Image (spheres, rainbow, N blue to C red):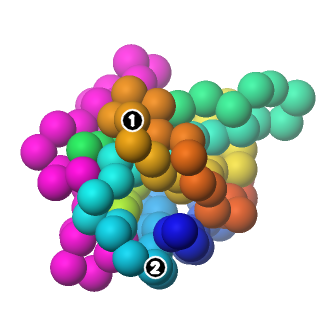
Amino acid sequence: QVQLEESGGGLVQSGGSLKLSCAASGRFFSSYAMGWFRQAPGKGRELVGSISWGGGSTWVADCVKGRFTISRDNAKNTVYLQMNSLKPEETAVYYCAGGQSYDFPDDFWGQGTQVTVSS
């Protein structure tokens, strides 16, 4: 099994940037698709972006397209989410997850990292 630990969250002003990292331990990280989800207060968890096992295919939600970029470095067992032009409504707990499905990689999860965007 793969264990995940997110980092890089924090407080940022509206329009600012953050880069989240998700470090994986355990074997076969490079065999899994990875994704970033977020959950705002009082809302359900939504998939923000996903990346295939080799990094050749990526997808991001329409609401973050052009502002968020997902990437991975399999040599470092790490997946990233670069977030630019952040909005207050994007305040949420951001979760790293992985799995067999590139469309919805949710087989295993990290603990989450808080991102707060102030107006």
Residue at x 16%, y 54% (from the top left corner): 54
Inspect the magenta stretch and tell me whether residue 55 lies in it.
yes
Q: Residue 26 carries which label?
A: 2
> Is residue 103 toward the left or the right of residue 8 in the image?
left
Answer whether residue 69 is magenta in the image: yes
- Going 29% across and 44% down the picture, which residue do you hit? 51
Q: Can you give x and y, in whole percent of width and height, for residue 46 in the image?
A: 61, 29
Q: Between 99 and 21, which is closer to the camera in this rendering?
A: 99
Q: Position of residue 28 (x, y in %)?
A: 33, 69
| Nearest the eye: 11 or 33 | 33
Could you tell me the amino acid type at mark 2?
A: Gly
Residue 101 shows which numbered tag? Answer: 1
Q: State which region is magenta.
A: 53-78
The answer to which quarter of the image holds residue 50 is top left
Would you identify the image quadrant in which residue 9 lies? Answer: bottom right
Image mark for residue 54? none
Note whether 87 is above or below 103 in the view shown.
below
